[in-house]
Image (spheres, grey):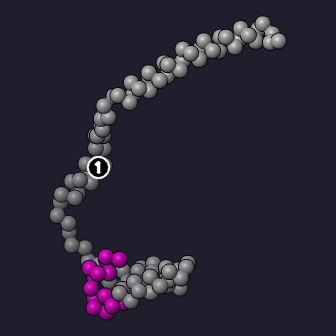
Amino acid sequence: MLPEITKELLTQYLVLLSILVPATILAIMYHRSLPKEVFEEEPAETDIVEAEKAKQPEKKVKVDINKLYAELKKKYDPVKAGDKKTRLRNKQVMLKIEKAYKLKDIKTLQSF
């Protein structure tokens, strides 16, 4: 029925499969049994520089309240919002921003 060469190839494939399947299973079991260690990377030079900057006391930066208000107004403009839910949220945020601007509350404006 099957040619002789096909029978030989089929036999070779079965032998190969019977060898590779257990070897693969053993390799997977060995890999799973290894302890899972987390290696921390050494900090890069930029990370070290940023850490040093963070340690230094921050200088008080004078914030232009008008510029900050203009940026927030542009960012939370309800007219430019896509959907109704975002538009409503932006309206509420703008009310808080305008109230903080009238009171000259820079910390509240910076929190947005």
Principal SS element in the magenta part?
helix
Q: Is residue 16 above or below residue 45?
A: above
Q: Quadrant of residue 95?
A: bottom left
> Is residue 35 shown in magenta?
no
Q: Is residue 95 visible?
A: yes
Q: Quadrant of residue 69?
A: bottom left
Is residue 67 toward the left or the right of residue 87 in the image? left
Q: Which residue is at the far right? A: 1
Is residue 51 toward the left or the right of residue 33 in the image? left
Q: For the residue carrying disc 1, how many other residues have a C-alpha within 10 Å: few (<14), some (14-19), or many (20+)? A: few
Q: Picture coordinates of residue 111 (x, y %)?
A: 31, 76
Instruction: Specify the segment rendered in magenta.
Output: 98-112
> Is residue 104 shown in magenta?
yes
| Quadrant of the drawing holding the C terminus | bottom left
Q: Is residue 101 visible?
A: no
Q: Picture coordinates of residue 96 (x, y %)?
A: 35, 87
Q: Which residue is at the far front? A: 1
* Numbered-mark total: 1
Q: Is residue 46 above or below residue 107?
A: above
Q: Quadrant of residue 10?
A: top right
Residue corresponding to mark 1:
47
Residue at x-position 29% and y-position 81%:
108
Q: Picture coordinates of residue 90 (x, y %)?
A: 45, 82
Residue at x-position 59% and y-position 14%:
16
Is residue 66 toward the left or the right of residue 11 in the image? left
Q: Of residues 17 and 58, which is closer to you in this image? A: 17
Residue at x-position 42% and y-position 79%:
71
Residue at x-position 33% and y-position 91%:
99
Q: Picture coordinates of residue 45 (x, y %)?
A: 29, 45
> Label 1 sits on what residue type?
Asp
Is residue 4 toward the left or the right of residue 55 in the image? right
